[in-house]
Image (cartoon, helix red, strand yellow):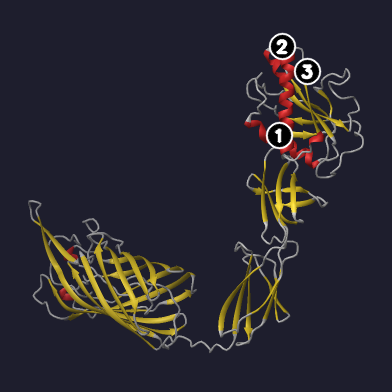
Amino acid sequence: MSLLLLLTASAQNYDGHGFNLTPVSSSPSDGLTTWRPSSQTLGQGSFIGLFEYAKSPLVLIREDGDGNRERLPLLDDVVALNLGGTVGLHERVAVSLAMPLFFTASGQTSAVGPAAGDLRLSVPIGLVLVDEGFSLGVVPQLDAPIGAGGRYLGDRGVGFGGLLAARYNTGPIDFSANLGAESTGSAPSLNLKGGPRILSALGIAYTVIEGTAVHVEGTFRPTLSSNDIAVSESPAEALLSVRSRFADEVFWTVGASTGLTRGATAAQFRAFAGIGLAFGRDPEVEPVPPPVTVAELGIKVVDVAGGPIAGAAISLDGVDVGITESAGNVTVSELEPETTPILLVRAPEGDGYKSVQLTLDPLVLGPQKVTVELPYEPGIVRVKVTANGEPADAIVQMQGHVEHDPVEVLGEAPLTLEPGPWDIIVIADGYGTQSQTVEVLPDQESAVEIDFKLVAANVELTIEEVVTLQQVQFDFDSAKIDADSLPLLNEIAANLKASPELKTVEVQGHSDSKGEDDYNMRLSQRRVEAVVSYLEAQGVERDRVVPIGYGEECPLVVENSPEDMAVNRRVQFIIIDPAPTDGIPCHEGVSARKTGSRTFIRRLDDQTAPEQAPDPAPEITQPEPVAPPP
C-alpha cells in the first residue's frame, strides 16, 4: 500500500509515478536509484531501457461524515519503460538524461493509453575519485514538465534540485549514499502542499562473481512541510536488484521494490527488468601471452622425512643460483630448454645433512619442479630440548667410547657421533638434569631423534652431597622402591653421570627407632642396595655408589613425635671421594648432616668441581623429607 491522501480529487498536474532512474554506466556496481561517484571518459557512456510494473503509487482516501474511509487509486497498474542515458564529458563530469514512457496506467481519469513522463537532466560531477576507498561527488538536477500531468504522470512546473553523492569501495563490496534536496509540485485539492523535499538514498552492491553484482537500495524523500495526514508526503521504498554484464558492451538488470511508508509516490510494489548497452569504449580484449621460449625450474630441498630444509645453497652447472628459504624452495628462471644441467645442493653447515649432486632430466618449456632429498651424515643424533613446550637452552654431554666436548644447544641441534652406545646428558639452569642412552649404528644415514622435556629440578648437586628435594619412598616394610620415586632416582643418576669428578658416593639408609635394632639395620641395608641397583641400571658405575644401611644409629633429630621419626627415615647421597673437609657424616663419630655449608657445583659455566669451596659459602637448609612408610 502506498499513500494516505485526503478528501476530494480533481485532474491536475502532479507526478505520482515516484521512480527516478540513475543511468550512470554499465558497471555492475551501479544502482538503480542511488548515485555512485565514478570516473568518466570523454565520449564513453551507456543507454538503458528498464521495464517497470508499479502497483498503486498514488491513492486517494475519501472520508465521509461518519469517519468511514474509502480508498480510491488515482494511479494504478502502471506499465512503463524507463529510458536513461549518460555520456562522459570529462574525467570528472558526465551528463545524464532519464524519462519514463508509460504504456498504460489506470486510475480515476478516463485516459489509460500511452503517455510520456517528465524529463530529468542530471550532471554528475566527481570531486574525489578513487578505485578503492572513499569517493565524493555532486549531482545537480533539472526536471522539464513534459509529462501527462492531467493523468498524475507529470508536474506542472520546472523542478530543480541536487544532491551530494558518497561512495566507499572495499573489494567486492561497494557502499553508496546520497543526500540532497529538490522542489516538488503541490496538489492542494489532494492535500499535498509540495515545496522543498529532502532526497536521501543508501545502496550496497556486492559483486558475487566478476561482472555480476547484487544491490540493496533504500530511498526516503520527505517534504519539509507535511500535511494533516502523517507520512502522506514522506515516501520511502526498498529495492533489491541484480545487474550483470554478459558481453563486453551489453548488460541486463532485474529487480523489485516495496513501499516502506504510505507516502505519495511510494508504490505498493514494483517489478523491473531491462537491458543496457555501453558505447564509445574499447572492447576488453584479453591480452595474448607471449610464447613461452624458456624453462623455469622450481627446486625444493627436504630431509628424509619430507620436512623442508632452509639454508641449502643451490648451484646449476657450477653457478650459484640461490639459497633455500624457510619452506625449502628456490625458483630459477630463464633456463635453456632441452638442456640437462648438473644440480648441486650444498647442505647447511652444522645441520648434519650430506650434500647431493645429480644430473637433471632434459628441461622442458615453462615451469617444472624437482624435489631433492638430503640424507643425514652417518651418526647424526638430533637433540631437541624443550621446557613448557618452548625451545630451551642447555648444555649437552656425550659420554661414550670416544671423548667429545660438551656443546651448548639452543633448543635443537645435531650431534655427530661414532658408532656405539652413548649416554646423552642434558643440563639446564633451573631444571632437572636428564639422561638418555642411544645406539649409533655403523653407516647409519637416518638421524636418531631424542626429545628432552625439561621439568623443575628435584636434585641439587653440591661438592659434599647430592641433595634431594624429595625423599626416596619404598613400599611398606619393604625394599621395593615406590614408582613415584623413580623420576627422582633418574635425575640423581643423570647428575652422577654428568659429574665424573665425584668419584664415590655413599648411599646411606636410615630408619627411625621403631622396631628391633637388627631388623631396622637389615631393612635400611636392603633399601639402599635396591637404590644402588637401580642407579647402576641407569648407567652409573657400580663402584661409584656404596650402599650402607645405618638403621637407627645415625638420627638427624631426637624422636619425640611421629614427625621426628619421619625425619629420621631417609636415604642420603653423601660424597666421600673427594672427601668432605668436615668429615663424612655417620663415620668415625661425625654426626648426621642436617644443615650446614653447601658449595654448589656450577653447571653451565664450569663442568668440573672447584678444588676448594669459595669463602664464604652459601648456606642451605636440608628440606624436611616427606614421611616414607616404616
Would you say 246 lies left or right of 396 here?
Answer: left
Q: Distance between the residues labelled 2 and 3?
A: 19 Å
Q: What residue type is labelled 1?
A: Tyr
Q: Residues within 10 Å of mark 3 (few under 14, many from 20)?
A: many
Circle 3/circle 1 CB separation < 8 Å: no
Which mark, residue 534?
1
Mark 2 element type: loop
Q: Which mark is in front, 3 or 1?
A: 1
Mark 3 = which residue?
556
Residue 207 drawn at (x, y percent): 39, 70
Question: Up-down: is 442 above or below 473?
Answer: below
Question: Up-down: is 539 above or below 239?
Answer: above
Which mark, residue 516?
2
Q: Judge by depth and name the residue closer to the eye, 192 or 279.
A: 279
Q: Which amino acid does label 3 sit on?
A: Leu
Asked where in the image residue 518 lies, by quadrant, the reply is top right
Residue 490 drawn at (x, y percent): 70, 37
- Nearest to N terminus: mark 2 or mark 1: 2
